[in-house]
Amino acid sequence: MGPGLVVAEGERTKESARFAAFYASYVERAHRIAWRLVGGDAASAEDVVQDAFVKACRGLRDFRGEAELQSWFYRILLNEAHNHRRWRGLRMRFRALFTGNEVASSASMGSTDVGLRNRLGSAIGDLSRAQREVFVLMYLEELTVNETAELLERSPGTIKTHLHRALERLRAELADLKPEKDR
Amino acid sequence: MKDNLLDEMDRERVATAYAPRPLSGPAIVAMQHRIEERTVRRSRRGAIVLAACTVVAAIGVYGFWSLGAQIPPSVNVEAPLTQWEADVLFGGEVFDETQDDEELPEDYLALANAFEL
């Protein structure tokens, strides 16, 4: 094996190790975000996560700063989730043309509160893309306003407005659901 | 005062209710393998597409070049050759249409066949 090949092999090993570390630190949160954005479908969430990592893998070597890397990767993930939702919507509408009824998504999850999950999933699904993303990132994932703003490339003021409107719509939609201790 | 489920205090309940089952260790590893396989396939596919595009482009450039070398765009193949063109093409060997095919210069025959004259 020539010195060139040894260097190339070393580079590949280093890249592979870097990807493994990157994957290990992001996969769980990415899966959770994807699952929440695609409406609670485990298989779709897995597809979205895989697509996002495959896309991210190639650009990984250009990143140095961790904060920049995180925003970049989550931006890819959000776009993948959005594309997935859009295509799934089209497919379901197309299928409904032939079968005559809407095909329900195959929701699956760990929570035992299935009724609440379905209500939440349907209400979150009715939000606009921006409202849904802000709600998932800020309310569920507990990112700060600034982190969300950087990730979505919007101003903090816009992010606050989206969250406010999302919560307003969800409160109206889920008005009958009471907090746990009041139930 | 809390109005309903989405108030600040119940954020955790909402987040718990609307969350996936955590990925197991083997599932994480299996997904990593699938991602790595897809990445390798993708780069291989990219290399094949690039090679195919290069070959097509090379054939195109060669074809264009060879065609362009044979027929300068300003030459009207329908018009009779001028003396100057005859000089350039056939080294001054002028021929007339009454000549038998056998006596015509080979280059002219090839050219005539190519354009079905």
Image: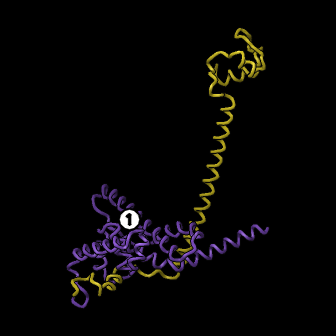
Chain colours: A purple, B yellow
Would residue A9 be visible to someone looking at this image?
yes
Tag 1: amino acid: Arg
> Can you give x and y, in whole percent of width and height, for residue B116 in the image?
64, 21
Q: Residue placed at 38% from the left, 74% from the top?
A: A36
What residue did someone put label 1 on? A85
The disc numbered 1 marks a residue on which chain?
Answer: A
Q: Quadrant of the N terminus of chain A?
A: bottom right
Q: Is residue B94 above or below residue A95?
A: above
Q: Is residue A159 left or right of residue B27?
A: left
Q: How many marks?
A: 1
* Front residue of this view, candidates B92 and B17: B92
Mark 1: few/some/many CA within 10 Å (<14, 14-19, 20+): some
Quadrant assignment, res A117 = bottom left
Residue in the picture at 77% in, 18% down? B105
Frontmost residue, A74 versus B46:
A74
Residue A118 at least partly seen? no
In screen coordinates, is A83 left or right of A62? Answer: left
Query: Viewed as shown, does residue A42 lie left or right of B37?
Result: left
Left or right: residue A31 compared with residue A182: right
Residue A7 position by quadrant: bottom right
The vertical placement of A16 against B66, above or below, is below
Q: What x and y, as percent, mark residue B74? A: 62, 25
In percent of width and height, residue B79 lies at: 62, 17
Tell me what residue is drawn at x 68 percent, y 21 percent: B112
Q: Position of residue A17 (x, y in %)?
A: 62, 77
Q: Give the image quarter of residue B94.
A: top right
